[in-house]
Image (cartoon, rainbow, N blue to C red):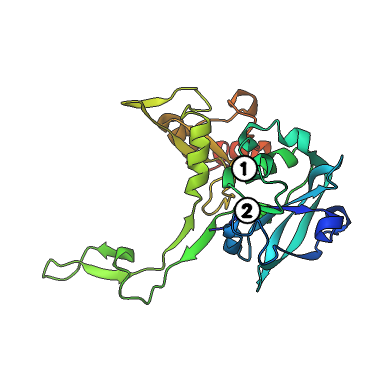
Amino acid sequence: MVNCWWIVGNEKVHGFDPDKMKTGELQQYGIRSGHKKRQLFSYFSDVQVGDKVVIYKTDNESIKYISGLGIITEKLKNDIITFKKIVHLERKLWLLEIRKIDALKNLEFLNAKIGPITISKIKPEEYYAILVEVRKNNTIPVELDLSSVITVKDTYSNKLNQDVQKEPSNGLDGIPDRKENLICRVVRDSNLTKTLKKQHEHKCQICGEALELGKGIYYSEAHHIKSLGKPHNGPDIVENIIILCPNHHVLCDYGAMELKIEDIKQRDVHVIGKKYVDYHNKNIYFGDEL
C-alpha cells in the first residue's frame, strides 16, 4: 500500500527551501529522536520507498503554499528519509486556496493543535484532491498517481488452485483435466472507488439516479473511462473514473453510448479528465469495441 505524506520545508527550521530544490533533486528529511512530537506522530515509521510526497513551503509568515510533488526514494535509520522532487509547480497552491477545498477540511496539517507539524500523513482522497487542484495549472506525470500495479501469480506453485482452470476432458472417466495458466490481473485501488461513490452519494454521473437496495443502502458502480486492461491500458486514477448506475455502466463498457463532458455531473473534488472522455468516444464508442 502506497502512503502519502505532507512535508513542510522551512529553510531556517528544516535546512532546505522547497523552491530551491530542482526537479529530480534529492533531499534528506527527518524527525529527531526524542522530539516532543515524535511520539504523537509514530506513524512516521510507516514511510516506505515509493510513497508520494506533497512538498509544502513556509516562512512562518506570508509564504505558505504547496511548492512541488515527489516520491520517497530511501529510508534510513534514526527516522531519516530521502525524497526526490518530481514536479516543481509553476502555479503554486496557496494555503488560502487549500482551506477552501472541501476534501481537505480534515487535513491534519490544517487542524494541528500542538503547533506546526513537520511531516504528516495524507489520506488517499486528500492526496487525490490536491492532484486534481494542481493539475488545473500544472502538468503532473502519471508516476505521481496512486496507480494500479500488475500482479503476476506464480504458475509453478501447486497451491494456486484458484488459478487452475477446468476444461472438458477427452477421457472416458468423466473427470475434467486441469490446466495451469499464467494469470495476470490489474489490482485496483478499491479505497479510491469507495471514496468517489460516497462523494457522489451513489448517484449516476450520467442520469443522476441512485439505486436503492433498501434500509438506506444504495448501490453504484465505478467505471474506468479508458479501460485498465489491454489494449487500452488506462490508469487507475480519479480523472479516469466515472460513477454510474448498472445500466449506464454496461452501455459504457460495450461502447454503446457516447460520453459528453458537458453532460457529466461533476464535483469540485472529482474532476474527470476530458482526454479520457475523448479517448472513449474515439476508441470505444466509435471504435471496434463491440
Count of residue discs: 2
The residue that mark 2 highlights is 4
The residue that mark 1 highlights is 126
Looking at the rendered structure, the secondary structure element under dot 1 is helix
Q: Are marks 2 and 1 in contact (CB under 8 Å)?
A: yes
Establish if 286 lies above or below 201.
below
User: Which image quadrant is residue 262 in?
Assistant: top right
Residue for point 68% across, 61% down: 35
User: Which image quadrant is residue 265 in?
Assistant: top right
Percent coordinates x, y for residue 82 in the rendering: 72, 67
User: Which image quadrant is residue 44 in?
Assistant: bottom right
Percent coordinates x, y for residue 155 in the rendering: 39, 73
Q: Amino acid at mark 2?
A: Cys
Observer able to see residue 86: yes
Q: Give the mark nearest the N terminus, 2 or 1.
A: 2
Relative side of 192 to 119, left or right: left
Percent coordinates x, y for residue 5 in the rendering: 65, 53
Percent coordinates x, y for residue 42 in the rendering: 58, 59
Please tell me which residue lies in front, 73 or 261: 73
Please tell me which residue lies in front, 154 or 199: 199
Pointer 2 local density, CA inside 10 Å: few below 14, some 14–19, many at least 20: many
Relative side of 162 to 210, left or right: left
Please tell me which residue lies in front, 253 or 123: 123
Relative side of 258 to 155, left or right: right
Observer able to see residue 289: no
Please tell me which residue lies in front, 227 or 154: 154
- What's the distance in space between the residues labelled 2 and 1, CA to CA? 9 Å
Residue for point 67% across, 36% down: 274
Q: Amino acid at mark 1?
A: Glu
Pointer 1 local density, CA inside 10 Å: few below 14, some 14–19, many at least 20: many
